[in-house]
Image (tube, grey):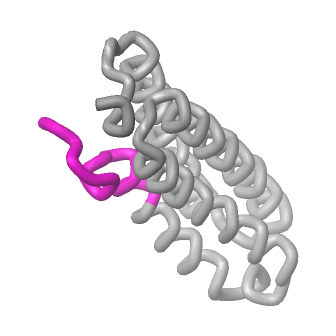
Amino acid sequence: MKIEKFEDIVAWQKARELTKDIYELTSIGKFEKDFSLKDQIRRCSISIASNIAEGFERGGNKEFIHFLYIAKGSCAELRAQLYIASDLLYINDVEFNNAYNKAIEINKLLYGFISYLKNSNLKGDKFK
C-alpha cells in the first residue's frame, strides 16, 4: 500500500486511538485531579501522532526519520507515565496493560518504519 498522506500511516492511526484512550483514562477518578500528570501524559500521547504527521509533511526522509524518533521518545515517556499512574493507583492493571500494550505496538511500528526508510533509496517528495 502506498502512503499518500500521514493519515494512511498505521502508527499514526494507532497513536490517534491511544490518545483517545489516554484522554478517557485521565478524565476520571484521582487522575482527573492530578493536573500535572494528566496534562503531561496527554501531551505525550498527542506528541506521538503529531510528530508522525509533521515529519511526513516535511517531505524528506531524513527529517521524517528524525520526527519518527521523536514520536518513539514520546511513546517511551508515555509508558513511563503509565507506570507512575499505576503506582499511584490512578489506573488499574487492565487499564495499564491496555494502554501500555498499545504504546509498545506503536513503538514497534515506528521502529519498523524507521528501518524501512533508512534502507530505502527514496529521499522523499521534496527531492523529486
Q: Quadrant of residue 90?
A: bottom right
Which residue lies most toward the left here? 1
Instruction: Identify the residue at image location x=37%, y=19%.
Output: 116
Between residue 98 and residue 73, name the one nearer to us.
Answer: 73
Say which residue appears at 82% left-offset and 71% top-offset: 37
Residue at image location 32% in from the left, 37% down from the top: 125
- 79 in relation to 21, above or below: above
Q: Position of residue 121 (x, y in %)?
A: 33, 13
The C terminus: image quadrant? top left
Residue 59, given in percent of the width and then of the height, sits at: 41, 42
- Residue 73 lies, with reference to residue 27, above or below; the image says above
- Rendering coords of residue 64 (x, y %): 49, 37
Tell how many labels: 0
Residue 98 in view here: no
Q: Which residues are magenta?
A: 1-15
In this rendering, the answer to whether 123 lies above or below 119 is below
* Residue 92 x %, y %: 65, 65
